[in-house]
Amino acid sequence: TLPPVHDIPLTSKDSNAVSNFLNFLGDNAKQIDAAAVQAQLSSASPTPVLLPGERAELAFKSGRDTVLITDKRLILIDVKGITGKRVEFLTVLWSSISGFAVETAGSTFLDGDSELKLYTNIIALPHFYQDLRKAQADLFAVQTAIANKLLGKDAAPLKDVDRRTGHIDPKTSWIGRGNARPLDADEMDRVFHASPPILQGGERCEMAFKGRRDVVMFTTKRIVAVDTKGLTGNRIEYLSVPWASVVAFSVESAGSGLDLDAEAKIWTDMMFHPGNGDDDPPQPYRSYLDFDFSKKLVNIFAIKRYLSVRCLGADKPNVQIKPSMLMISAPDKGMESFISKIGGDQRAIDVTELNQLLHGQQQMLLDDENIIMAFKAGRDTTAFTNARVLIIDVEGFSGKRVQFTSVPYAKIISFSAESAGDWDRDSELKLYTRNLWNLQKVKLDFRKGKADIVVIQKLLSAMVLGNLKDAANYLQSAGAPPPGTQKPQMSSLTAWLTSNTVKEDAAAIDEQLRMELPVLLSDEHCQKVYRSGRDLYVYTNKRLL
């Protein structure tokens, strides 16, 4: 059984009986001495929960339950039953926490508690909320402790970011005022290092924007969304999303006429709210964030470039593919063009012009980023660069509203390429990401005979699995014909798959997946191979295929 944890509040006990009663009903925790908790849970104690050398940093107690923040994890201690002999110790690794928020107390005695919110990438434990007693817990010390665990090392500020130094907030008219406008990032940096102390010492605010009452900041380490609540505005939530938790991002330019806003969309690896019946439908919650910006005051493409630098990182392979090495398809005509447009079937296009266009005035690509292959269906385009999959979606009759969605290769956790059958018009590529909301799976269709799905799969394998040598060289190997000029020999492979053996010769499959259907990378080797019916399971040194 767990020895009783001594209550050692940092401030005097509540003197108001009503306040004590409300704290009891609301499950509000008070901060206690972490050293006392560590002494009772150390490896040498009767309840050796902590590891040798593990240090307790903050502790909170609510009734019989305790929340402990250590240098290695978050521990939730839940005392159960009438006797209290049944105790659960729940450990949540810091690597499983993708975002966090602190919320200040309101102005009335009924709203007198502050709150800590932790968001995870665990489906069965999507979030953890803890109410903290007003005046008996240092909310911003808790925020600092969580930030120190999740944000990592300091990052250098970007040099080419317009920080709007000295900018005076124009406070636009009531119409469209909900759309964010720019703020002086240097001033916001000063404010949020002092009061409230949200930012770390080495952290810098690089961009800041304000809507009606809410503020969003892009810093060197995270996205900070400040949400002012209630009529008085005393209750404020400070949400932090580390850059490492961002799975994909998108910007959408404003349309024509009365369309006053441009948008930035962020997909994270945090769990969404699954809902509970018709009265409680699923909600994206922290798995998807959407910010509206004034199209007149904010350059949405500057935000896209900033997000690209922060989310894609600096380590991009130098992949240069000559246009002559790619299979370029002639545009469809007549009924074929109509069917391709309504079906979303893409065909390969020359990347030269698209590279120049996206490196042009709006600088949609980074300086060291280049398009390797691109495909087009109607007005929409999909481009594979040396850093991401870029999906360009043209919307509306005028075509002025365009969405640019970026999925970094590092955030793709699984993918499949499906060849077209005898009666199918298209082959398919499916990308699976760490986002659990509406970007969990990205499906792309390619026109049969107009795109080489084997080449696409090979490039994606190289980029996702980290074989940068193959990514740079596989299309330019000595004597190799351009993709599309030599059709893979699917018939012999299909005949072999329909035989009846269960375990197969890994060396034979290795050869077939290099010669007949070039799927494997240069440093990839088949280790175990099994077949069930017509389906094949290949265990390589890099993946399950």
Image (tube, helix red, strand yellow):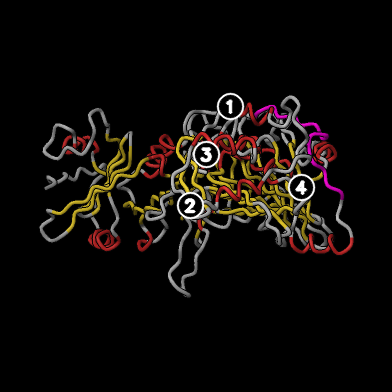
Residue 431 point in image, percent of width and height: 59, 49
Circle 3 residues within 10 Å: few <14, some 14–19, many ≥20: some
Mark carried by residue 156 = 1
Instruction: State the residue at coordinates (64%, 41%).
Output: 517
Instruction: Give the amino acid at mark 4.
Output: Phe
N-terminal-most mark, 1 or 3: 1
Q: Which residues are magenta?
A: 317-330
Which residue position is annotated with label 2? 500
N-terminal-most mark, 4 or 3: 3
144 and 488: which one is in front? 488
Give the secondary structure at mark 4: strand
Disc 1 + disc 3, Cβ < 8 Å: no
Mark carried by residue 375 = 4
Give the secondary structure at mark 3: helix
185 and 170: which one is in front? 185
Q: Residue furthest bottom?
A: 278
CA distance separating discs 4 and 2: 39 Å
CA distance separating discs 2 and 3: 46 Å
CA distance separating discs 1 and 4: 36 Å
N-terminal-most mark, 1 or 4: 1
Instruction: Give the amino acid at mark 2.
Output: Asn
Q: Is residue 413 left or right of residue 444?
A: left
Which residue position is annotated with label 3? 244
Instruction: Give the amino acid at mark 1.
Output: Ala
